[in-house]
Amino acid sequence: MTTLTDPPKASFRLSQLIYDTRYRSITIQVIAMILVVLGLYWLVNNTIQNLSALGKDFNFGFLTQPAGYDINQRLIEYTSQSTHFRAAIVGILNTLLVAFLGCILATIIGVFVGVLRLSKNWVVSRLMSVYVEGFRNVPLLLWIIAIFAIMTESMPQPRDFKVGGDAAMILGDSVAVTNRGVYVPGVVFENGLLGAPLLNWLLVAAVLIASLFVIRIVRRRADATQESTGIRPTTWYQQLALLIVPTGALLFLMGAHLQIPYIKGFNFTDGVHLRNSLIALWIALSLYTGAFIAEIVRSGILAISKGQSEAAAALGLRPSRTMNLVILPQAMRVIIPPLISQYLNLTKNSSLAIAVGYMDVRATLGGITINQTGRELEGILLMAAFYLLLSLTISGVMNVYNNRTQLQER
């Protein structure tokens, strides 16, 4: 009887790191990582030596120094004696504000125009084509300056709104459009639960978001009941109550009430002042990005088979219901990936705000603060880190939504 034994294992040799496919990829990755680390070390060391030669060091102590400049548009309390760090926070909030408003309005415009471009009405489709081609092929900076100039030069002055003047307020004498900006009613909290107005608004937003999550749970239960019994329970009154009651109760507890702007002297007082710089930047970003989103929506709709529309028509669905219930839900799988890029572009394009004097993070941290302190390297690194973090956040949130809309493979 013979005994079968395993052949002896070959010993490891250094040549296997190059010639053996099992180790070659690891070797290349290790070498690449070492080269990257050495490159970063050389870059940092060279920067420190150059700063030392100029009599500078690398620190962020300048953030605690008084800023010494004013910011015209702000969401939190700020004075010229506040620190550069608070000035940077004000600029960051201004950037987030215009990016948030721009993404919402650009999406609405893009979806609306994208659908109308496919209209069978020749006039409507051609007009939408003119809008898309006009805004896509003209630099964004020109649109920002043009809209700002129109609002500054063609709108009436605040003194024209006096009794007997040539101008009048709109929407029940609650909104005034002037060459200094738009004055709209503001919500004032008499008994704010938190210290700053912004924190109170964040509390209201948190309650509203929580209500939306509960409404979603109610809808899912209604869907499950419909799938199991074939009868969908009536839940609209529950959803409406969940949307209004918690937020309304919180506003009532904080003593929220509207503050209508009114003319006093040569200007308006009370209410909320939306400066021309903010409105021009917001409208220009929305119209410019909306033109690109319109093409994305149009291509996503065209990617859906025509048989889907024909099947919906055969079931008796109206064209509007077919678009909302059949076409757009399927087109979202094609629309979402390029839509993420447009949101990122809009956010980064908001840095053009300095052209019209809107004090975003580029104008505060990346502009005046750097000029006053001489900390250009630290300021640019902080600003780049902010834009990187913001872009990654937007991309991450949208990718989560994109994964939920994609078809799940077995």
Image (cartoon, rainbow, N blue to C red):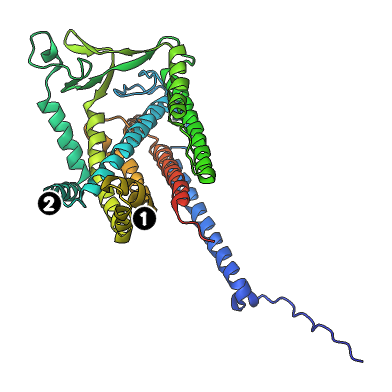
Amino acid, disc 2 = Trp
Q: Is residue 373 visible?
A: no
| Relative depth, front residue between 48 and 178 | 178
In x, y percent, where is residue 383? 40, 38
Q: CA distance from mark 2 to mark 1?
A: 26 Å
Specify which label sits upstream in the sequence, 2 or 1: 2
Total numbered labels placed on residues in the image? 2
Q: Which mark is residue 334?
A: 1
Amino acid, disc 1 = Val
Look at the image and tell me in which quarter the N terminus lies: bottom right
SS at circle 1: helix
Q: Is there CB contact under 8 Å for labels 2 and 1?
A: no
In x, y percent, where is residue 275? 24, 25
| Relative depth, front residue between 77 and 163 | 163
Q: Crowdedness of circle 2 by 10 Å Cα count: few (<14), some, many (20+)?
A: few
In x, y percent, where is residue 198? 42, 21
At 17% across and 36% down in the image, what residue appears? Answer: 145
In x, y percent, where is residue 79? 36, 18
Q: Which residue is mark 2?
A: 122
At 34% across and 37% down in the image, what residue appears? Answer: 99
